[in-house]
């Protein structure tokens, strides 16, 4: 929906809307000809599907494989082709780093390199966060005249690299090829204004590799998502409500904060996320709850672990339903089929439950059921207009 139209039609209401995003939820048929969602034990989601309605979303467009940033931006009602946010800005904001006007940021991964400089593990075995923090301390020794350099740990093997100085540009190529068995890509400039910044990044990488050399795990670095802080219309202002994000992983906290949502912090598990939602239930009208474990398992190619992660989400749902939300949406930001071990372009299943829902004939929450659901196939940026309409938060258009 057009954001100006949202401003015009959005209206306050005494209703609660919850958006649950199971990261990488969508899948394709696995070993037994069924997806992870079909294999999961969905006592509660299947019951919600029977009394709700289903559909599928396209995060960006047909055939486009989205990153997590565009996937979430779309779910929050913004056109991801208009509001393009780099991973660096998301990760930096997510850990509370205040990006200034002269900052450019990248999301970094510690990785494993073999003797020939080829990537053997893009995530360095998912190094513990504590170990990554110690390595970031060592990498902070790399500095350049006239430019401030920040290296901040995020979670597991992830870190944020920020360059601060006059004339810094985000027109820098990513060094992560997003596959193993090849060398990292050289950090070249993607536009003339990025030449100086790219040169600094190449120097930083060279010196970082020297510091990390000799390590068994985490002896290399990969950088992607160079970006500056974007300017976005604030979510609460657009929808005339109080909005909160409850996440475990910083990156998703970052995308919500960049949109203007409050971040309720302190959760390390899904159960703790639900506890925080219950604690702050009276303080907000809209809750975004992020669930990461489906995507982690999908990216690791672990079909059974993704099935279990979906089942564990389902097991926690009664705690959320006890709060009696008026509208509940359960979906993903993109598909991450375990058999592909990566993000994909496949449509994402969606369940809508709550007030004024026109039920379809679904008896379970699954990709095949969503393919014939009431809501059909539609752009992810239309999810919240549909949800807020069901919650009485969109006025009639025209006389």
Image (spheres, grey):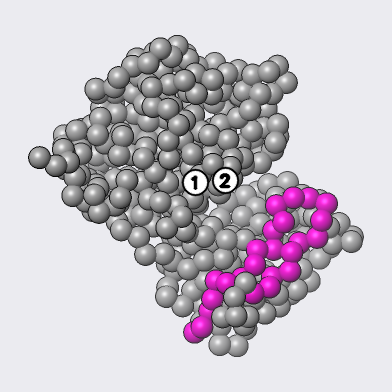
Q: Which residue was labeled with disc 2?
A: 64
- Whether the residues at callouts 2 and 1 have beta carbons within 8 Å, the answer is yes
Residue 159 is one of the magenta-drawn residues: no
Above or below for 199 versus 361: below
Percent from the top left, x then y, of residue 310? 54, 26
Residue 86 coordinates in the image, percent (x, y): 52, 60
Q: What residue do we see at 24% from left, 22% from top?
A: 356
Q: Decide: few, some or many residues near mark 2? Use Cα within 10 Å; few <14, some 14-19, many ≥20.
A: few
Label 1 SS: loop
Picture layout, residue 167 above or below residue 79: below
Q: Disc 1 designates what residue? A: 60
Image: magenta residue range: 166-189
Residue 264 visible in image:
no
Q: Is residue 168 magenta?
A: yes
Kindly state the secondary structure of the residue where label 2 is placed: loop
- In front here: 174 or 362? 362
Placement of the C terminus among the 4 image quadrants: top left
Residue appearing at x 89%, y 61% in the figure: 116
């Amino acid at each position: 929906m057009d954001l100006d139209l949202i401003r015009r039609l959005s209206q306050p209401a005494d209703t609660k809307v919850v958006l649950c995003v199971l990261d990488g939820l969508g899948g394709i048929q696995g070993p037994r000809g069924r997806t992870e969602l079909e294999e999961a034990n969905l006592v509660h989601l299947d019951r919600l599907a029977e009394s709700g309605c289903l559909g599928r979303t396209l995060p960006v467009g047909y055939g486009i494989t989205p990153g997590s940033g565009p996937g979430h931006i779309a779910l929050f009602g913004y056109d991801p082709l208009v509001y393009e946010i780099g991973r660096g800005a998301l990760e930096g904001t997510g850990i509370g780093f205040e990006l200034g006007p002269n900052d450019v940021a990248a999301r970094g991964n510690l990785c494993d390199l073999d003797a020939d400089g080829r990537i053997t593990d893009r995530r360095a075995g998912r190094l513990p966060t504590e170990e990554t923090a110690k390595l970031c301390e060592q990498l902070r020794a790399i500095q350049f005249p006239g430019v401030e350099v920040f290296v901040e740990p995020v979670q597991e093997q992830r870190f944020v690299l920020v360059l601060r100085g006059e004339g810094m540009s985000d027109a820098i190529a990513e060094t992560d090829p997003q596959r193993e068995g090849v060398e990292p890509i050289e950090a070249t400039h993607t536009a003339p204004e990025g030449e100086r910044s790219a040169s600094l990044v190449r120097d930083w990488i060279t010196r970082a590799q020297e510091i990390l050399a000799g390590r068994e795990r985490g002896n290399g670095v990969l950088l992607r998502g160079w970006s500056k802080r974007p300017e976005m219309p604030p979510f609460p202002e657009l929808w005339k409500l109080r909005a909160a994000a409850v996440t475990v992983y910083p990156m998703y906290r970052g995308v919500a904060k960049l949109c203007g949502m409050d971040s309720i912090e302190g959760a390390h598990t899904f159960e703790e996320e639900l506890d925080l939602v219950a604690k702050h239930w009276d303080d907000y009208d809209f809750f975004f709850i992020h669930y990461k474990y489906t995507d982690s398992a999908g990216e690791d190619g672990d079909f059974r672990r993704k099935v279990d992660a979906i089942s564990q989400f389902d097991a926690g749902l009664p705690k959320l339903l006890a709060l009696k939300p008026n509208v509940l949406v359960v979906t993903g930001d993109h598909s991450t089929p375990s058999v592909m071990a990566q993000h994909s372009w496949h449509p994402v299943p969606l369940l809508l439950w709550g007030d004024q829902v026109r039920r379809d004939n679904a008896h379970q929450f699954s990709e095949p059921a969503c393919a014939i659901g009431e809501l059909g196939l539609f752009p992810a940026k239309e999810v919240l207009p549909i949800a807020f309409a069901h919650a009485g938060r969109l006025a009639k258009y025209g006389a």
